[in-house]
Image (tube, rainbow, N blue to C red):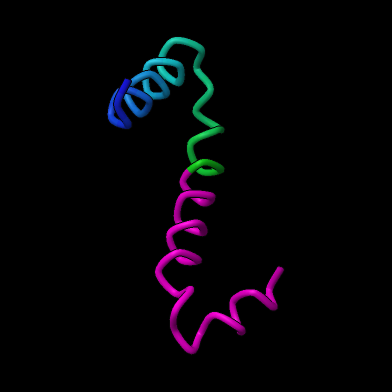
Amino acid sequence: MGKLSIIKEFWEFLKIRKKWWLTPIVLFLVLLGALIVMTQGSALAPFIYTLF
């Protein structure tokens, strides 16, 4: 199974079960994870980690 199939399966889950309220939560978590990964080697890292 590839990463793309996980996204497709999640999309099908949202459509069938009508769980649209999960979309903003998952989107926020993905963006937060991307922010942490992108800034881990920069000078901004200590400031981002203090938020948690």
Magenta: main secondary structure equals helix
Residue 36 placement, left or right of 8: right
Q: Residue at x 44, y 10 (%)?
A: 16
Residue 25 placement, left or right of 5: right
Q: Report the number of numbered marks.
A: 0
Q: Is residue 2 above or below residue 39?
A: above
Q: Residue at x 50, y 56 (%)?
A: 33
Q: The C terminus lies in which quarter of the figure?
A: bottom right
Residue 43 placement, left or right of 12: right
Q: Quadrant of residue 3?
A: top left
- Please state the horizontal and vertical placement of residue 15, each as a whole percent of the image: 40, 16
Q: Residue furthest bottom?
A: 43
Q: Residue 33 in magenta?
A: yes
Q: Is residue 42 above or below residue 19?
A: below
Span shown in magenta: 27-52
- Please state the horizontal and vertical placement of residue 7, each as a whole percent of the image: 35, 29
Q: Residue at x 55, y 33 (%)?
A: 22
- Please state the horizontal and vertical placement of residue 37, each as a whole percent of the image: 45, 64
Q: Is residue 30 above or below residue 9?
A: below
Q: Residue at x 48, y 36 (%)?
A: 23
Q: The N terminus lies in which quarter of the figure?
A: top left
Pick whichever, 49 or 1, lies toward us. Answer: 1
Q: Residue 6 in magenta?
A: no
